[in-house]
Every structure is written in structure tokens, then in C-alpha cells.
Amino acid sequence: MPVLVLLAGCAGAPVTPEPASDRTAAEEALQSGDYHAAARLFEGLAEQARSPQREEYRLKAAQALIQAGLAGPATRLLQSVDSSRLPADLAMQHQLLQATVVVSEDPDLALSLLARPAAPENETALHARFHQLRARAFSELGNHLDAARESIQRELFLTDIKDIEANQLVIWEALSNLSNQALEQLRVRPPPSVLSGWMELARIAKDTEQPAVRIAERIDEWRQRYPGHPVLEPMLKAIEIKSKALALQPGHIAVLLPLDGRFAQAAEAIRDGILAAYYDSAQRHNVTLRFYDEGSPDEVLARYDTAVNQGAEFVIGPLGKEAVRILAREEQLPVPTIALNHAEPSASESLFQFSLAPETEARQIAELAWLEGHNNAAVLAPAGAWGDRVRESFLQRWEELGGTIASTSEYDAEQSDFSDPIKRMLSIDASERRSMAVRDVIGRQVEFEAYRRQDVDFVFLAAFPRQARLIRPQLRYHRAIGLPIYATSHVYAGHVDPAQDRDMEGIIFGDTPWTLNAETSHAPLRQKVRTVLKRHTGSLQRLVALGLDAYLLVPRLSLLDSYPNDRFQGETGNLHVAPDNRIQRQLVWARFKHGEPQVLPRTLFAEPIEADDARE
């Protein structure tokens, strides 16, 4: 996530003048994105200046290092600055930069650093950034209410209409993460409280059970209760339009799933997720939900036509990849359709593809590792079609971002000893061969300790639980201690088992909010469904979540398609519609600690990063 540039100016003039060209070059490097050069130039200027100009330049150098993704050097530079002797504006810049470095990894520490602002309120740009950082820290901790409260405070220091619009979107996103019950219980202050006004708006927007006319009436009533509320009129209109659209649930939904064969168990889990969402909806009495066997790939078009001819206004399915491929080749489909797999791009604008594809997870892991500052990847994946797909998806994205592939290795998933592929990946086998060559030359045994290659920043591991539980300790044995390990959701069996998973200590992986029990606006429904659907164990629970999200997407699909920046916080991830009509999901990140997955307090890349945005 790019670090925002601090906009505050600094008071004070240098005691020892430095060449204006050096200052200009440093500022131009910072503005152009050449952060390494900017840091060097500002540090050079600091060496020539006296206080407080020296500290100002060091803060600017630290800012450049942060933007270059070099948190360690930035921290050391900030530690060299004694903020107690600085003017108030520079002291607050120091405070904000310290918090910026740690906000993703340690939001509690960021909040302690931001306990109170170091400069008076007339330093508006600094105070705007102060509240922005506090909002982000609360968001990292999952405290969406306080995140919204801080953003409301931030708006008091904003004057540019575009900044206000962006800030109100942040407020709206934070409150949209709260459940209806939370919005009702936490809204304790009456009008004209600004926060309560925002919360009541969010509650109205979430109430998709209301008819469109009633939603318009409720928003008019809201205007009368909060006449001085700062919400911008265009945003209020957008809320009204979207709320009305969400209330227009199709009256007849068809579901195409394989009722027998090798996908029948997966289809049953998806079906139960769909039924859970259907029975939880107050509109179920106005909706006909009918299930059809998708049949063989050759039969899927006929089954689809039958469902539409019998009145379906919306179709969920099919599930089989070949069946989805056949449907994707149709240039026109009569009703909106969510296929539950990925195939080739859709020829019809009415077909959307939604799945839990491991390729998507591999690409997101590449983005996470890149944003965490890594450059050189080692890849360990199983031999076979699944391993090839996951590995190639990771490699493609990693290279798009500008990363380097230090090594790749594949292993036999049926084995238990993975020493040979691990040695190949870490070049330990080459080190051993060199030792043997030396021994052959001198004709006697030599004392030798093999070493691994040093140009590896992290390991991307494609594995299932059995393999991951064995590979992690074997990596440590082969001198990979300290190397971060990133993996797809497949390393986690889907239920907490400290005894089995203790050997996966430290592995970072992405998974669904449903599996990790992460906070979403549908958490109460999740608990009810899990109680009833205990028979779906392990990875099948992710498919229950897929079915639930597929049904919840039905009234939201046209909005997500029309508003590319909108998101739906589902149980499979944070969902949006990409330009290719694929429904993309943002994973939740977790790390194994004492054998249990701990959700990481981070909101990295809410948007997919573009290759052009990659750091140097």
C-alpha cells in the first residue's frame, strides 16, 4: 500500500546555507518517485545543516526511505532524531513518520505513538494525516467504528472537495463492514451526531428487505433528522440509487449443480450455502429457488435453457470447468448468470465467473510478498497439474511486478522426505558437490559445512496440510531459518488443530474470512450455518461460503458491475467485478502461531496493484 506524502511545510531556516540546486534536486527526486536518490540527497543536505534544518532534512530522507519500502533504514534514521528539541511542526512530522513505519505490522504501537498530536490544530495538513493514520490503525485492528470516527475527525481539517469525497468513501467503507446488529446497537448518540448520522445511513443501505419506495422515504426522513450532516449530496444520491437497486431481488433463481459424479460432494456443500443464505433472507417468500442437475458438459446448454424457459430470471452455476467453458462461448445469454468456476473469457456480458481458484491465491501471494519488500523468490511446488498451475500463476505475477526468481524446485507429494527438492531450491546440493570435488582433488576428507544460497528473500510454498507439516521443519533443518514462507489456503485443513499444525509455525497464508472466522458483516449468519452444517468439514466449508456468497451476490451483481470501485464483503473474501467479468476476491491473511492460524491485522492492497505502481 503506497505511503502518502506528508504535505506539511516546515518552519525555520538553515544556519549554514546549502546550494539551492541540491535542495531542488532532492525535492524533484522525491516528487518524481526516485526515492533512493531523494533519501541520499536529503541525508547529504542534513550533514551540511544545523538544527532545526538538519532534522527537517533527516525527516524528509526518512519519508523517502519509507516510500521506497525501506522501513529498517527509515526507522534507524528516525531514531537518530531527538524530537523533544524540535519545533512543534517538525516534532509532529517525526511522530507521523514513526507511526507510518509500524502501522501495518503493529497498529497498537502506531496508536500509542499517536496518542496526542504534537502540533497545534492550525497545522491542518499534519492533523489530517494524524487522524488518517489513526483511522488506518483502527482498521488494521478490525475496529471499524473507531476507524470511521477518526475519519470524521480528519474531515474537519480538509478543504479540497476531492479529499473530502475520498474521505467520505473511507467512512462509508468502514461502517459497511459492520453488521446490521452492530450498527443498531452502537448508534447510541441521537441527532445531530455526525457519526450516528453515518451509521443510520449505513443501516438504511444494508436493509435490502425494504421495497425501493420505502428506501427513498427513509432517506428523506434521514435528511430531516440530520439537516446539517456533512455528507455530500452526490454521495447521498449514490447511496439512494444503490439501495434501491439492492432491493430489486429477482423473483425466480435457478441453480445448476452436478447432482452425482465426482463433484457431487462439492456441489452439496455449495447448495447448502445457497440454501442458508436463501432461508436467512426476509424476501425468501417472494423468491422461487429451483435446483437443476447441470448434467454432462454436452447437456449444460439444454439444462440452462430449461431453467430459463421455466421462469428463471437469474442463474447460479454450472460448476464443472468444461460446462462453464461451453457457457462462456455463448455470445448471448438471456439472464444474468454466475458460473461457479473459471474458464476462458466470457463472450456474453451476462456471464460472470466466480470460483476459489488456487491461481488467484498464488497471484495475491506474489503481491503480498512484493509489498512487504521482498525481491528474490524461491518456489517449492508439487509435481503434477495442480502444482504447475499454482507455480506458473505465482511466477507470472511475480515477474510482472519486477521480482526475481532465485530458484524453483518441485517435489513428489506422495513422499515424506523432501530433502532433495529443498536442497536443490536452496543450492545446498551444489555446495555439497563442491565439497566432494575438493575432497577428490586433495585426496582426503575435509571438514565442511554446507550452506544455502543467500539471494533468497522468501519461499513460496504450494502444498496441502500433510506436505506442509513435513516441509516446514525440513526447511529449518536445511538452514532456511528466518526465511519467510508464504502459502495458499491449501496448507490449512480448515479447522483449528494445534497438535497437527504446530510444525507449520510462522507460515503466512491467505484464506477466506469464513474459514479464519474473520470479521464480516455476515458473521451472525456464519455462526448459524456452521451449527447446522457440521457435516461439511475441512475444505468443504470454503465451498459452503462460496454458495452463500453466490446467492448474496445476486441482487448486488449489477451494482458491482456498474461501479468498479465498489466492494462486497463476502465470506469468501472482499469481492469486486473485474473488467473481464470475473468476480475477484481479496483474501484474509493469517500466520500459524503455536499451531493455530492468527489473522494478521493488515489491510494490504485492498485494490490489486498494477505493475506500473511497483516499487523500484
Image (cartoon, rainbow, N blue to C red):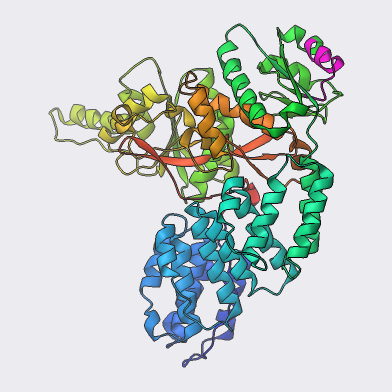
Quadrant (top left, top right, bottom left, bottom right) of the C terminus = bottom right
Regarding residue 512, the answer to whether it shows in the image is no
Q: Position of residue 381 (x, y in %)?
A: 45, 26
Visible in this render: residue 180?
A: yes
The reply to whether the magenta stretch includes residue 326 is: no
Measuring from the top left, give residue 319's x and y in whole percent: 66, 18
For the residue pair 453 and 410, the one nearer the viewer reads as 410
Of all residues, the one furthest to the bottom in this rendering is 15
Across and down, in percent, residue 425 comes to 38, 31
> Quarter holding the N terminus?
bottom right
What residue lies at 44% left-to-right and 64% top-to-bottom?
111
Who's the residue at 60% across and 70% down the image? 154
Relative to 163, is 588 above or below? above
Q: Is residue 270 left or right of residue 316?
A: left
Front-lying residue, 188 or 287: 188
Pick the residue in front: 63 or 6.
6
In the depicted structure, whether residue 340 falls above or below residue 407: above
Label count reads 0
Query: To which quarter of the image does residue 234 belong?
Result: bottom right
Image location of residue 557, percent across then percent down: 75, 36
Compared across the picture, whether 53 is left or right of 27 comes to left
Q: Which residues are magenta?
A: 303-314
Q: Residue at x 84, y 46 (%)?
A: 213
Residues 349 and 210: in front is 210
Residue at 74 percent across and 69 percent down: it is: 161
Whether residue 305 appears in magenta in the rendering, the answer is: yes
